[in-house]
Amino acid sequence: MARALAAVEKYPEEPAVIGLLDAAWKAARAHVIGLTGPPGVGKSTLINALVQIWRSRGLSVGVIAVDPTSRKTGGALLGDRTRLNIDPEDDQVFVRSMAARARLGGLAALTIPAMVLMRAVFDIVLIETVGIGQSETDVANVCDTVIFCVQPGSGDSLQFMKAGIMEVPHIAVVTKSDLTAAARRARADIEGALGLAESPAGAWTVPVMLLSAARREGVEALADAIERHRLWLAGTGEGGRMRALQARHWLEDSVREQFGLRGLQRAKQALSAPSGLSPFRRAADISKSLESRD
């Protein structure tokens, strides 16, 4: 896995790499979970607890930790990875840190290819973002289940109410719930914010949960809620629709980054044409077509 990720990062346009991503896209098996929230909310502690639960249930886990970027080297500071207490002898858990660099959205450019590779190998793929703000909602375009974490008494619940963020999570979690009164207030704030949005009939109802990862309280219930959402996605067909939209979003982003808005307009017909190909193969074909026109 480490060698494959290194190849994707160094040689993203090589035919062998595109072929690998194409095969991985078609062999998807994992449920992909995004964990986001402000720095210091306890995401790494929660990841440790969730990984232990999933491993106890016999599930293999891949973790992508998107870290802040070092200004000197341009690489990841690796703060999140050092806080993850993973058994190095357990070959059913794989952790990869990557730098967000200049990219907004809380993710790195390599996140989606890395997720696709891991999704073909593990039972669970968990992506931890740098943080969340008004522009940092890209995690919804990568994951099947998005968890938003709030810390009691921090004002994070007000951040949650900002436009865009309220529509992102499938599960909301108030961490450090041993701060009981503040935790209950934060949960009430989030429930109030969710109540402002109109949901169509049959839509998923976002649960707001209290937990303390350090004390292992409420984490099993969170793992169960994630499984309920996975079953809901499969039962309603929403999961397939979401992944199709994610593929389209990644493809458009890839063309825009390489050729700009003008290139995106020129590729409009190719982007909208139905295709059974992976977005990586389609991106390579569109890139070749646009370069030949130039």
Image (spheres, rainbow, N blue to C red):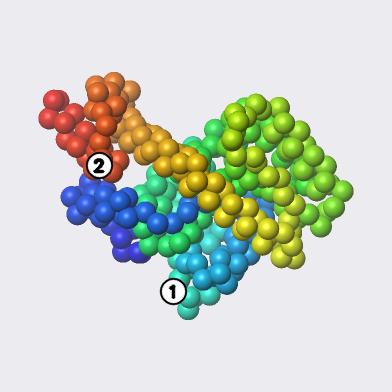
Q: Does 184 sit above or below residue 218?
A: above
Q: Which mark is residue 277?
A: 2
User: Which numbered disc, 1 or 2, marks the residue closer to the eye?
Assistant: 2
Q: Does 180 sit above or below residue 48?
A: above
Q: Residue at x 57, y 72 (%)?
A: 56
Q: Please provide percent x and percent y for residue 129.
A: 54, 48
Q: Which quadrant holds residue 240?
A: top left
Q: Which mark is residue 91?
A: 1
Q: Please provide percent x and percent y for residue 99.
A: 46, 50
Q: Residue at x 61, y 58 (%)?
A: 223
Find the residue positioned furthest to the left: 292
Whether residues under marks 1 and 2 lie with C-beta atoms below 8 angstroms apart, the answer is no
SS state under label 2: loop
Instruction: Examine the rendering and report whether any part of residue 113 can be seen.
Output: yes
| Mark 1 neighbour density, 10 Å: few (under 14) some (14–19) many (20 or more) | few
SS state under label 1: loop
Instruction: Examine the rendering and report whether any part of residue 8 can be seen.
Output: no
Q: Which mark is residue 59?
A: none
Q: Residue at x 12, y 30 (%)?
A: 292
Q: Please provide percent x and percent y for residue 5.
A: 34, 58
